[in-house]
Image (cartoon, coloured by chain):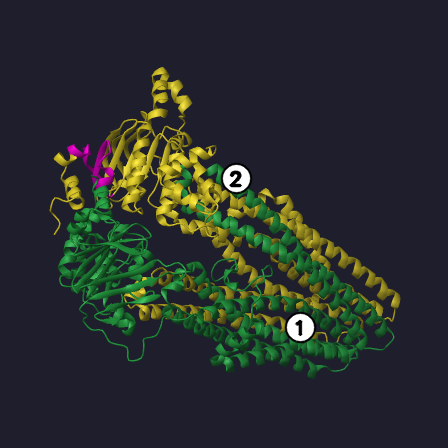
Chain colours: A green, B yellow
Amino acid sequence: MAREMTPPPGGFGSGRMSRGMVVVKPKNMKGTLRRLIEITKGQRKGLGLILLLAVLASLSAIFSPYLIGQIINGIEAKETVTFLLVLLAGLYLSDWLVRFLQQFFMASIGQRMILHIRKTLFGKMKDLPIAFFDGRRHGELMSRLTNDIDNISTTISDSLSQLMTYVVTIISVLSIMLYLSPLLTCVAFLSVGLIFLLTKTVTSHTRKLFAAQQEVLGKLNGQVEESVSGLTMVKAFGREEALLEQFEENNHKLAEVATKAQIWSGYLMPIMNVINNLNFVLIAVISGIMAANGKIGVGLISSFLLYSKQFSRPFVDIANIYNNFQTAVAGAERVFEILDEESEPADVEDALTLENPKGEVIFEDVVFGYDPEKPVLKGVSVKIDAGMKVAVVGSTGAGKTTFINLLTRFYDVNSGRILLDGHDLREYRMEDLRSAFGVVLQDTALFGMSIRDNISYGREDVPLEQIVKAAKMAGAHSFIRRLPKGYDTLLSQGGAQLSQGERQLLTIARAVLESAPILILDEATSSVDTVTEQRIRRAMLEITEGRTSIIIAHRLSTIRDSDLILLMEDGRIVEKGNHEQLMALDGRYATMYRTQIGE
Amino acid sequence: MKFIFGYIKRYKKMFFTAVLFLTIETMADLLQPTLMSYIVDNGVQQKDVKQILLYGVMMLFIAAMGALGAVVRNIFASKTSQLISMEMRSDIYKKVLDLSFENIDRLAPSSIITRITNDVTQIQNFINGTMRIMLKAPITCIGAISLIILRTPQQIPMMIVILCISFCLIGANMWFGYPRFGKVQRCLDKLNDVSREFLTSIRVVKAFGGQQQEEEKFGEAAGEFAKAGVSATRVSAVFSPLINLTVNVGIVVLLWLSQNQNSGEIGRLMASVNYMTQVLFSLGMVSMILNTAVRAVASAGRVEEVMNEVASQKDGEKTDGEGAQADGAAYTSAQADSTHRGAKVCFENVTFSYAGEGEPAIEEVSFVANPGETIGIIGPTGCGKSSLVNLVPRFYDAQEGSIRINDIDVKEWSMDALRKKIGVAPQKALLFTGTILENLRWGAGDATMEEIREAAKIACADEFVTGFEKGYESLLGQSGVNISGGQKQRLSLARALLKKPEILILDDCTSALDATTEAAVLEGLRRKADEMTVLLISQRISTVMRADKILCLEDGKVEGFGTHQELMEGCDTYRAIYASQIGGGQIG
């Protein structure tokens, strides 16, 4: 599976690949290429221009040695070469112009293409269901947004024009060489064959070594990451020695395999040099003898030598370019894989709008599993009246959070149905449905924006008074006020400068501001101390007055006053009722309650 | 940069051997066109096949020498650069393990990780490159120019002009390009930030309908990145073809000036043209080298920053053995006692603030935990509970006051001996890649399977571990079994118990457990609690209620210290917490 392949090393934005890359082969070269061509539609004229310029550039590179040879011949023969010199100067000038234009346009066309693909991919990602994100590591998705896309475009704009250049070069150089001297061309071919064979032998060797290097490097980096982020435990348990030992072992292994890989790949250049030189000498000797016998002019030797050098290069590089190309196509495949994912189900035709819902929620025999084979909810039925305060309790893994995932349609039920105000959730417009819920989730997601913008997230132009009011209700106002810039304090990503409790308060303020008809709190106050929690709850009760609220909590003391308590166990609701009823029932809830208050 | 040279110095013999052979390799390359010109001038022009063959053989010989030089250079260069980076990696790693948390906080863990991984690779590429092309380019350039000048002195003025123009162009390229590439990097960081934020906040984005906003944010960041990229590449699009043009014009001028040469020097002319192309090649290389060098310098600076961090804590000298000697028999008995019953922990007027500035996290805290006692620590969010216990194993050092363990200041204990006494189970359980067994054995390498299972049973972990296909041999981590946050906390607790510490620090380590499991864990702990001194942090009053003594904190200050009963009578904060959790009819 391409998805599980190692992303290119060097972190994000390492851009072009080096010689030592591990080549990742695409699964479906043809199909992916076709789609790639499809995606470059808007840039085709530009791409055509670049390729044309590449051809022109290589042509000028090809004709200059020929011209130089002619000039040298002329000088030797004591003829005037002024015209040829002007021609050469003109050739160089046009070469400059072509190169400049090529690079100039390549920059903008390449970047435009990247931007286009990137925006398309992100646009797709934002519509994908939660299930997609839950099943994948963030780092991997990020590398698709950055590395993979960069690779695609460098390959298209770069490798393609390079490939073009080489094809043009090989064809025209070959024809010129054949025109100049078929015999010498055969000699030159000899070295190309040799170089080709050697490159193959060496790379087949190095590929394995580089793969091994990549593996050890991954292990080593993994250890670094673990030990730095887990340093408290390392120190508390005095693990420094053991870790160092393990690190040294991998470090040595890495140095060993990397040295081998580097030495092997390093042989390529000198060997090629020798072959090139051998070629040079052979051509020099043979052409020298030919010239001495008056069969060819001296200038031809000069041109030919330059050509034979130009000739062997593309053969070596083409293998490399092809490898890069393959890796990029594999990257494109990974990008397309996401584009092919199924988006969140679109709203049904004539979907219902939902304005000011009453908030009556009915679960009808709901069965759901993240993996349909392993249901998490095994037939849940419950009726929540409008305006009810409901609490869902139960042990870890009982399906409490799943309950909420279904209600907000982060996931859809496998069977059964959920009704809001008498209609199946799936009948409503998604946008309306989600804005009917004010959600405070377990993980506090804060953005790298000002506190003010974080509280009013998802809405525009909210007056400050309203934000402050929401913050006050959530109990966040007092700590915000103490920050140097108050509500304009810029949060670092994830709100790292705040404590977990403060972060929770901000996310609560966000939900308060949204003042949605149905409030959902998923362990929203787990990191807030109980005194503050109580204050928040009192404020919440005030704002939720008349609204439906659903609370998931560990601490039973905080949900005692709910109208309806649902005790979940193993995907089913095993006890329901209010606190007094459940205590009177003297079942599991009563036991749990008693253990918690320490009786 | 200095710091890189330090490493090169250590391997200077190997480094200079590589450079020596690189010179041989380059010289051999440079000699080829000259020999070629001899073939043309002395052989072809004179129609002397013997001369042609003679110089041909010489060329081959020199090519072989060059190849030999390259092979030797390659071996030495690879070995040296890999050895250097290996040492560098291990030096930083050692350094990081030695740093105190104050240092780590200052540098930020994620940045330390990139320094060890990315930056070292960057430096390695540079060192390796130095011995490959970086020195080769200037040698080629200088060699080619000198050969042109030596053989045709009349070309000196032209060569000077070409070089001046070229270097101006390279300089201009750097001058305009460098800040632009810096901007590209910053834009890329921004783009990464935006995508990471989107991915980690996906639920909130969807729940609050922020897709549009996120798409705009991303589009903007991607657009900025593209713009920066275009502007940066355009700089080199302007300058690098100009460098080409300069040298090419040089070739035309060279040919122009040679028009009236006598034919005996044709070979020499050809050689000159050839050398000009070599100059062109090496000039192209120079700007590439400068780019790598700039990056390597930046990386070296970042690595150096870590290396220059001075561990802010000094290690003490006392170990249990020495302590016994110094304090005589009285201490020995106390020590013997302590291994059974835990250690005495004593805080005296301790004040601590992070990085030594700002509001103190802990202010004037004093209390005593006697051997075998369990001290519950409770208080509102951010009141300094975790900061307090972090001072015991010296994760941080207090600015004022003293913390004593068995009547010896923690700063006098050797770090090793101190931390051996302490077991920690934090709220955020950290487990490393490896088997469950390996993770549990962290503090007790020689623990028997029975001991391990006993500890796991107390932590309520045995049941789910044995439920795994491979039991205690199950792998944790990315390729291993999936375990929940609560299961992680239980394993981390078992690990701390297995160490059989004199002081056990439990920092809200049951927060992810449901009430029933938590009660079972606490019950198990209580049975063991007499064997050690326990510092038990919790948000839940029911968890700390049964502790021997309870420390109630607010804003870093002690609000009360005593038994549950005493605090209920004399501490308002404690009563308020109690009321909020257990009740008394105060809930709205």
Q: Is residue A75 above or below residue A150?
A: below
Name the chain under label 2.
A
Q: Position of residue A54 (x, y in %)?
A: 59, 77
Name the residue tied to disc 1: B251
Q: Residue at x 83, y 70 (%)?
A: A286
Say what amino acid the circle numbered 2 marks: Glu
Asked if both marks, 1 and 2, belong to the same chain, the answer given is no
Identify the disc placed on residue B201: none
Label 2 residue SS: helix
Name the residue tied to disc 2: A245
Crowd class of label 2 (few under 14; some 14 to 19; many from 20; radius 10 Å): few
Q: Residue at x 85, y 64 (%)?
A: B53
C-alpha distance separating marks 1 and 2? 59 Å
- Residue B381, magenta (yes or no): no
Say what amino acid the circle numbered 1 marks: Ile
Nearer the viewer's eye, disc 1 or disc 2? 2
Label 1 residue SS: helix
Residue at far bottom of view:
A83
- What is the quadrant of residue B406 in the picture? top left
Q: Position of residue B95 (x, y in %)?
A: 46, 41
Can the viewer see residue A131? Answer: yes
- What is the quadrant of residue B358 in the picture? top left
In front here: B237 or B248? B237
Q: Is residue B329 above or below residue A191?
A: above
Q: Is residue A306 left or right of residue B246?
A: right
Can the viewer see residue B312? Answer: no
Crowd class of label 1 (few under 14; some 14 to 19; many from 20; radius 10 Å): many
Q: Which residues are magenta?
A: B539-566
